[in-house]
Image (cartoon, rainbow, N blue to C red):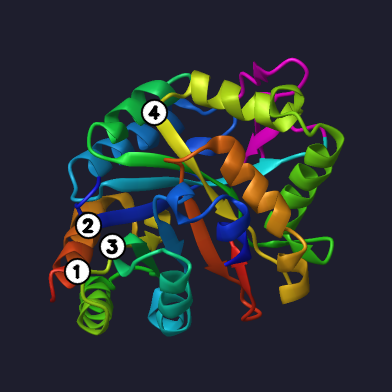
Amino acid sequence: MDVIKRAGGAGQITWVNLQNADGTAGEFVGPLKSAGIGVGQIVGGLQVGEGMQPYVTQEFATLVKQYPGFGGGWLWNLEAFGTANTASYAAALSKGLAGG
Amino acid sequence: MTGEAKIGVYTLGTYSVANPTPSDQDLMVEEAVALSASDFNLVMLASLHVHDDGSIFFNDTPMINSNPPARSGQLSRNLPQCFKTIMSKSVMLASFGGGGEFNGNPVGYWDFSAIKTLIGKYPDPTKNPFFQNLAFMFDTYPWIRGIDLDLECNSLADHQSFTTTLATIIKWLGAGKYARFARTSFRTFGWT
């Protein structure tokens, strides 16, 4: 949070990508809010491999249930699930953010 | 993207192949088209690295040379077309740093160490080789709209030693750029 303060405040940050959000959101959401970064500015990350679309939907549905208004999600990484699955992973993530 | 949920993905390696073959280039186009046809609206290129002279590498491939800033010429000539395709749907960021060990520390630690040293030597961003190269990168690839700071360290103390460096990068880049928080595999915290 010192970085936000020293960088000139939360106005300098458009959003924060939170790595491994399924395990870290509980520790970061509160302190980020105190630093001026609202839940809608936090984008949660998840590491994935092949054939994990249902898992993606489930994890993000759980996250948004716990933190309504979450700013979005991201996946690490495309090459791990394959170009041919790009649309289905994006759809799985989108579905999870919509509540599953 | 204000008000719209971010649906993001990192792409690792596809676009950083040095002197790509026609087959490599076909894969790049295929991935760009797949991204533009999907619901993803945030794409992050992983991973960019900074050397001691401020030069920028895209994974192991030289991207922007230092003094003066110049394209290395080793990346695909089709990158602009691929990035333009991706950008038709997404915000695209370049992710600096990342994991993977080198000489006892995560690779990102060394990238931000180089940036820290260069900020100390060149406190004016217009004279700082890394920031000159970063500006050149944005000019060369205007589809890249910001950077993702993926500092990974072995300890909280190491992370804290980069607080001023990260704040300086964010300040110098100005509002509207982006930052990412990371957590290392050692369960310490940091900015990335």
Would residue B83 be counted in the magenta stretch?
no
Q: Is residue B186 left or right of residue A79?
A: right
- Disc 1 and disc 4: Cα gap in Å? 26 Å
Mark 1 or mark 3, earlier in chain:
3
As drawn, the label of residue A71 is 3
User: What residue did someone put label 1 on?
Assistant: A97
Q: Is there a contact, CB below 8 Å, between mark 3 and mark 2?
A: yes
- Tag 1, which chain? A
The amino acid at mark 4 is: Trp
Crowd around label 3: few <14 · some 14–19 · many ≥20 (10 Å) = many
Does B127 sit above or below residue B39? above
Give the mark nearer the N terminus: 4 vs 2.
Answer: 2
Q: Amino acid at mark 2?
A: Ala
Same chain for marks 1 and 2? no
Number of marks drawn:
4
Binning the other alpha carbons within 10 Å of mark 2 as few (below 14), some (14 to 19) or many (20 upward) gives many
Tell me which amino acid carries mark 1: Leu
Label 2 sits on residue: B5
Name the subunit of mark 2: B
User: Do we see residue B23 in this rendering?
Assistant: no
Q: Which residues lie in the magenta part?
A: B53-74
